[in-house]
Image: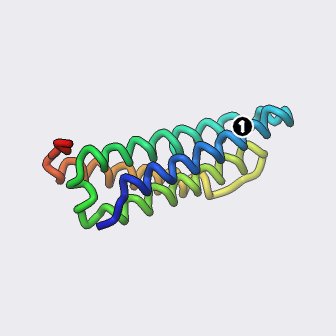
Amino acid sequence: MQRLDRNYILLGLVWVIAGMVFGIWLGASNHLNYANSHAHMNLLGFVTSVLFGLLHWAYPALAKSSLAIWQFAIYELGVALLVIGKILVDGGQQTLFLEVGSRVTIAGALLMLVMFFRSGRKAATT
């Protein structure tokens, strides 16, 4: 069985390191126009990934869903595309990354909702 709880938390930690490095760069270089990208990187990348990981830990039935690995891949791909799109748009470029990434991220979040309701909400006892 996939350890999606661990994978989500690990990827969330990667996101927070990337967000910190990006935040330090934008502050030090006075590129504050990228603050919105920085916020999306940390909130959707770090916070939501870790929360999804904790949901997988608290509700082990989530990982047993046939949708679980797909949900993980779709959500994380969506966030990556969205963040790349935000960075490009905040830099003044036109891109479809933001639009596509936003929709893919929402699809990943909706899949988590479906999985949660299907799981019967059985919490871990330990």
Q: Which is more toward the observer, 47 or 80?
A: 47
**Image location (x, y in percent) of residue 81:** 58, 57
Color style of the picture: rainbow
Q: Which is more toward the observer, 58 or 38?
A: 58
Left or right: where 124 falls relative to 16: left
**Image location (x, y in percent) of residue 6:** 40, 54
x 65%, y 53%: residue? 84
Q: Report the residue that reaches farthest toward the right.
A: 29
Left or right: where 86 falls relative to 77: right
Locate the N terminus and report the quarter of the image it occupies: bottom left
x 79%, y 32%: residue? 27
Q: Residue 24 lies in what quarter of the image?
A: top right
Q: Secondary structure at mark 1?
A: helix
The residue wearing badge 1 is 23
Above or below — where is 104 with respect to 12?
A: below
**Image location (x, y in percent) of residue 123:** 18, 43
x 48%, y 39%: residue? 47
- Residue type at numbered disc 1: Gly
x 70%, y 47%: residue? 87
Q: Residue 35 lies in what quarter of the image?
A: top right
Q: Report the residue that reaches farthest toward the front.
A: 126
